[in-house]
Amino acid sequence: MQGLFSDPALERHFTGHSGSITQLRFSPDGGQIATSSKDASVILWNLNQAARCIRFSSHSAPVNGVAWSPKGNLVASAGQDRTVKIWEPKLRGASGEFVAHSKPVRSVDFDATGQLMLTASDDKSVKLWRVARRQFVTSFAQQTNWVRSAKFSPNGQLVATACDDKSVRIYEVNSGECVRTFPEERSAPRQLAWHPWGNMLAVALGCNRIKIFDVAGSQLLQLYVVHSAPVNDVAFHPSGHFLLSGSDDRTIRILDLLEGRPIYTLTGHTDAVNAVAFSKDGDKFATGGSDRQLLVWQSNLHTYDASQFDAKSALASSGCDTSAASSKQSLASGTSKSNDLSIRIDPRQSLAYQRSEENFQVLDSKHANQQKLLTMDSQTKSPSRPFF
């Protein structure tokens, strides 16, 4: 049928990690992807030069999280070894280390200016740092269990935390006060994402659910039960109209938030999907998992037309659409929809999937100009010498 919107399509298929991928992030310019892994490394995949990528292996234990600074000139990684590494994303760039917590560090995040950094840890705290001067600023410490994730709001005025005490908390950066708490009864939140407008928060839950909250109004806006196993990660499309999720059920879902329904079910991973992310322009998204695969997709969401979705879904399920296989599946109990009419896409027969780019050159970052930072904790007085 001519004129229908285009489905997401697999563009690249990378393998290279020897352990599960734990998180991934696109560089601000969209030309690279950073992946953290249980193999104690971070790999920078160059999407513009397929045969070359850089591996950073400074951590001594699994790496749980990774983040790019807004300008793309720094990468931060959070490790099970209790450290946060900050380094220049090039072969011989400078690097430094924060011994930021007394227990493993789960996540790291830069604010929109790149001047502040958040770290979240199994020591039940979230810490705020001033990057340039290696300076501890404050702690957000009302959590009573491991903190899996901490994220700045888009304007940098709020911080959201996801904790194993079955809570999501919202803090004001300036005052340090907890201004909102969203308790969970069923299970702990695993990951969270701020809406691009900064007024909503998506939460991935261990009870197979996804919740979207109105932060200012302290109310639940949407609830999705579209996965059959715990949800590990969520990401908003830059338009704010779509949400991407990855789960232990090995699938990726794309939700149309305006219509309040799943529109795509993507397969291809052979184990849990741990990490999902959109590029800054939304043209691409990437998924990574316990199967050590990194899949890079063309989103094609700029072509999506909700008014045509039902017709295309019906066409796909009838077997007439050669662009994607589709199936109607019942959603798990608790949703308002009786049927899942999402279009199912399996890329494993595509050329992009079969052309797994596993023979490229992996270059180990030497960091010859390494600047060793002082060991830091919350009591350390920062010297005035700037970082990098």
Image: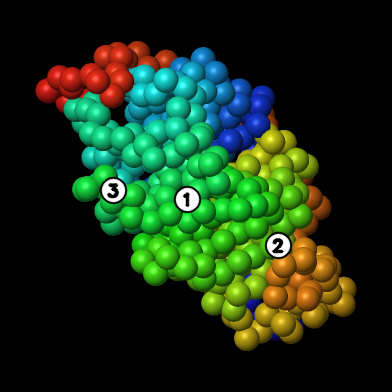
Residue visible at 53% across and 27% down in the picture: 63
- For residue 212, above or below residue 320: above
Label located before the other in sequence (1 or 3):
1
Could you tell me how far apart the alpha carbons at marks 3 and 2 are, in whole angstroms? 34 Å
Seen in the image, is 364 located left or right of residue 76? Answer: right
State the quadrant of the C terminus. Answer: top left
Q: Mark on residue 177? A: 3
SS at badge 3: loop
Q: Residues within 10 Å of mark 2 (few under 14, many from 20)?
A: many
Seen in the image, is 315 located left or right of residue 220? Answer: right
User: According to the image, label 2 marks what residue?
Assistant: 226
Q: Residue furthest left?
A: 384
Seen in the image, is 326 located left or right of residue 192? Answer: right
User: According to the image, label 1 marks what residue?
Assistant: 168
Q: Nearer the viewer, residue 305 or 153?
A: 153
Residue visible at 38% across and 56% down in the picture: 180
SS at badge 1: strand
Residue visible at 73% across and 76% down in the picture: 337
Label 2 sits on what residue type? Val
Q: Nearer the viewer, residue 127 or 268?
A: 127
Could you tell me how far apart the alpha carbons at marks 1 and 2 are, in whole angstroms? 21 Å
Residue visible at 66% across and 40% down in the picture: 289
Q: Residues within 10 Å of mark 1 (few under 14, many from 20)?
A: many
Q: Position of residue 90 (x, y in %)?
A: 39, 28
Label 1 sits on what residue type? Val
Label located before the other in sequence (1 or 2):
1
Is residue 339 at all visible to an observer of this figure?
yes
